[in-house]
């Protein structure tokens, strides 16, 4: 029998005397085992994990028992906790850019932990850092030690976070949604990396996620959380084969289903790009001489019709978002852009403004794109103020109507963004775009940060709005299940080039290029493996 590393018994957590957000949670993790903690946002997963070594704020009241290798963590002194934190138990968090210090080099950030826990410095620390970075797949690590976090891609930053977590040879690794915001190929690489490292080191792994496709691939055992309680736990294969609790059944069934309704053969073209190119100049020297270009988009051609959805897929940095921004004339480009029958490539901002009403955008992170200082009414009505109201229209009534249409109660329009859930905030962002009755909507990763059940709701909402208002969608995503459910056509991008495009069914069922085949294998093997 493997040694029990972490043993949690009747753990409850409450903040400032309010009702507990975690209630009577019990489970254990053994050496070499992967335990998945699964549930939707707000279920108490992260609070449970952070409470293991008291990383919660002082306002948190923790009761119950958490023992690590027989040592009680609840009520332990700071010296004991410091010894365990980052040394015996390490964390990997969801968004590395917020966990890494933007002002410190790679060497300084990893070296800090080595100096604190192992007393390593100088050449010995540098050798250990290079070895760690090499193990997690950072190419030529010695040359990257003086780089800063912004100089790495999202997948590379997540690998750096893993290197930092492994720096002191922990016995238990707690990974909190470490693959949620990365591409499917990067996700597959990170999961393989964690599995290989776990096998080599004999670590226990607590993997927190809302993605059951990931759980199916890596977990030995599963705990399903809902409203602060564990509603079901057991062997992963048994739970997937025969889920007993209705909530577990609901999570397993939560996947975007169906296929898009075919577009009419005579549907008018809303927008067209011909040989679109977006290159960003690289300038150096005192006189800012152009010494090269970042070739974000090369020679892209496609058109999008009324009631049609074009999915744009590819890895981070492939040019997906830049292509959409170029089409909308939000970045400089070369080539022909036709919007609603008019060639707008040479138009100035003043000429474009009346047309902007017909081109709207919904972003990945609604919390970042909604002003925290404005009420929902002000946010949704903002576009009406810019483009003007038609005679006889009442802005408040229009806001109430669109909120109802996206499934929100108009009585909430006086509230602020922080008072809503992630799914509700995304509905608000959609309402802000839709109130202007656009013809084309760019959806830039609108579901990637949402729980599976909420994703399904948003997909259904987008379908309904498209049908009702004859909308054209450019749908950018790394979640190929959602792309498959929504898209009539798909563009596959790699390093600025459209390497394949065609009907959604053809791209998913019979991809022609090796790159597309790799994307599909990474996405669907995760779900089925």
Image: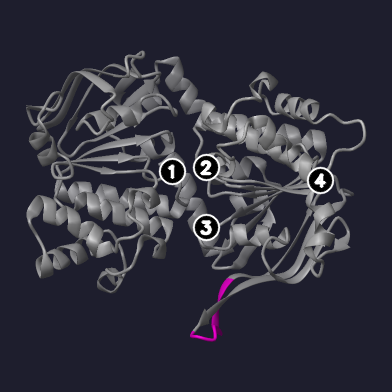
Q: Give the labeled residue for mark 1.
A: 180
Q: Earlier in the sequence, mark 4 or mark 2?
A: 4
C-alpha span from label 2 to label 1: 7 Å
Magenta-colored stretch includes residue 466:
no
Q: Give the labeled residue for mark 4.
A: 387
Kindly report the secondary structure that dominates the magenta region of the rendered protein: strand
C-alpha span from label 3 to label 4: 44 Å
Foreground disc of the pair 1, 3: 1
In the rendered image, the quadrant that contains the N terminus is top left
Q: Give the labeled residue for mark 3.
A: 517
Q: Give the labeled residue for mark 2.
A: 448
Q: Earlier in the sequence, mark 2 or mark 3?
A: 2
Residue that appears at 60% across and 26% down:
415
Q: Earlier in the sequence, mark 3 or mark 4?
A: 4
Taking 144 as reference, is 291 left or right?
Answer: right
Looking at the rendered structure, the secondary structure element under dot 3 is helix
In the rendered image, the quadrant that contains the C terminus is top left
**Is 19 situated above or below 53?**
above
Foreground disc of the pair 3, 4: 4
Figure colour scheme: one colour
Q: Which residues are magenta?
A: 285-295
Looking at the image, how many numbered discs can be counted on the residues? Answer: 4
The answer to the question of whether label 2 and label 1 lie on touching residues, with beta carbons closer than 8 A, is: yes
The answer to the question of whether label 4 and label 2 lie on touching residues, with beta carbons closer than 8 A, is: no
Q: Earlier in the sequence, mark 2 or mark 1?
A: 1
């Amino acid at each position: 029998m493997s040694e029990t590393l972490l043993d949690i018994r009747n753990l409850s957590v409450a903040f400032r005397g309010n009702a507990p957000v975690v209630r009577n949670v019990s489970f254990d993790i053994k050496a070499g085992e992967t335990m998945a903690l699964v549930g939707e946002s707000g279920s108490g997963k992260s609070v449970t994990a952070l409470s293991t070594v008291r990383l919660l704020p002082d306002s948190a009241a923790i009761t119950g028992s958490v023992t690590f290798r027989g040592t009680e963590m609840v009520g332990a002194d700071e010296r004991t906790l410091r010894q365990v934190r980052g040394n015996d138990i390490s964390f990997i968090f969801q968004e590395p850019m917020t966990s890494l210090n933007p002002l410190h080099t790679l060497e300084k950030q990893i070296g800090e932990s080595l100096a604190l826990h192992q007393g390593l410095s100088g050449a010995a620390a540098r050798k250990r850092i290079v070895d760690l970075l090499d193990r997690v797949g950072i190419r030529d690590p010695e040359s990257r030690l003086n780089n800063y976090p912004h100089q790495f891609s999202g997948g590379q930053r997540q690998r750096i976070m893993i290197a930092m977590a492994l720096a002191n040879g922990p016995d238990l690794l707690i990974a909190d949604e470490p693959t949620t915001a990365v591409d499917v190929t990067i996700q597959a690489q990170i999961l393989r990396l964690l599995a290989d490292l776990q096998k080599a080191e004999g670590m226990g792994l607590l993997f927190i996620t809302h993605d059951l496709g990931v759980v199916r691939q890596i977990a030995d055992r599963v705990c399903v959380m809902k409203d602060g309680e564990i509603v079901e736990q057991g062997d992963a294969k048994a739970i997937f084969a025969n889920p007993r609790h209705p909530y577990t059944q609901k999570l397993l069934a939560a996947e975007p289903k169906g296929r898009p309704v075919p577009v009419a053969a005579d549907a008018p073209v809303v927008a067209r790009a011909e040989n679109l190119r977006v290159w960003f100049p690289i300038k150096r020297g005192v006189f800012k001489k152009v010494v090269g270009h970042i070739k974000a988009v090369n020679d892209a051609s496609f058109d999008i019709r009324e009631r049609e959805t074009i999915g744009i897929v590819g890895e981070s940095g492939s040019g997906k978002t830049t292509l959409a921004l170029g089409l909308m004339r939000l970045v400089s480009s070369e080539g022909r852009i036709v919007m609603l029958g008019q060639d707008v490539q040479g138009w100035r901002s003043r000429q474009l403004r009346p047309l902007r009403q017909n081109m709207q955008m919904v972003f990945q992170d609604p919390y970042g794109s909604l002003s925290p200082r404005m009420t929902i009414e002000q946010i949704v009505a903002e576009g009406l103020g810019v483009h003007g109201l038609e005679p006889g229209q009442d802005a408040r009534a229009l806001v109430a109507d669109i909120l109802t249409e996206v499934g929100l109660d108009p009585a909430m329009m006086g509230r602020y963004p922080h008072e809503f859930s992630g799914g509700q905030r995304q509905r608000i962002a959609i309402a802000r775009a839709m109130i202007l009755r656009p013809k084309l909507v760019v959806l830039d990763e609108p579901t990637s940060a949402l729980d599976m059940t909420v994703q399904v709701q948003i997909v259904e909402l987008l379908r309904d709005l498209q049908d009702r208002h004859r909308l054209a969608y450019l749908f950018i995503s790394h979640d190929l299940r959602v792309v498959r459910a929504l898209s009539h056509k798909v563009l596959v991008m790699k390093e600025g080039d459209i390497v394949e495009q065609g009907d959604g069914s053809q791209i998913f069922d019979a991809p022609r290029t090796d790159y597309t085949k790799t994307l599909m294998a990474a996405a669907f093997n995760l779900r089925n493996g």
